[in-house]
Image: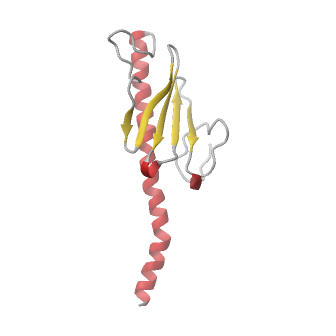
Amino acid sequence: MITVAVIAILTALALPSYQDYVLRGRLVDATTALSSLRARMEQYYQDNRTYQSVGTFVSPCANSSTAGTFTVSCPTLGNASYVLQATGAGTTAGFVFTMNNNGTQATTGLPAAWGTVPEGGYACWIGKKGGTC
C-alpha cells in the first residue's frame, strides 16, 4: 500500500512537468516553420522583386501550411513587406508566433497558464512557461 502511495505522489509531481516539457518540444515546429518560410520568401523576393505572386510565379505565402499542430500563414503580404504567423491548435492552442520581413520575432498569443501577452506582444518567441524577453 505504501508503494502505491509513493508512486501516486511521484506521478502527481512529475506528470505536469513532463506535459510542459512535451509542449515546449512542440513549439519548435512553429519557430522552425516560420524561419523556413522566411528564407523561402527572401529567395522569392530576390527572383521577383516582390513578395506577392507575379504572373505564373506563386509566392510561398499564397497558401497556408501546417507544421505539427500549427497553421502557418501570411496575414499581411505586400510588395515589400510581410508578416508570417504560426497559430497553434489542439495541444498548442493559444500560442501565436510571428515574424516579419525584417526578421523581427514576436509572441502575440499565449495560453492563460503560460502568462499574459503585453500589448504588441513579446519581442521574441517565448519557449517556456513564465518566460519573458
Which residue is drawn at the image coordinates 56% and 47% (left, top)?
A: 110
Residue 10, percent from left and from top? 46, 76
User: The N terminus lies in which quarter of the figure?
Assistant: bottom left
- Outermost residue to the bottom: 1
Q: 53 or 105: nearer the eye?
A: 53
Which residue is drawn at the image coordinates 39% and 17% (left, top)?
A: 44
- Outermost residue to the right: 119
Q: Tell me which colouring the rendered structure shows.
A: secondary structure
User: The C terminus lies in which quarter of the figure?
Assistant: top right
Q: 50 or 54: nearer the eye?
A: 54
- Outermost residue to the left: 56
Q: Is residue 92 above or below residue 55?
A: below
Q: Quadrant of residue 70?
A: top left
- Marks counted in the figure total 0
Which residue is drawn at the image coordinates 52% and 14% (left, top)?
A: 80
Residue 30, percent from left and from top? 44, 40
Q: In which quarter of the image is residue 11?
A: bottom left
Q: Quadrant of residue 34?
A: top left
Q: 124 or 16: nearer the eye?
A: 16
Q: 79 or 14: nearer the eye?
A: 79
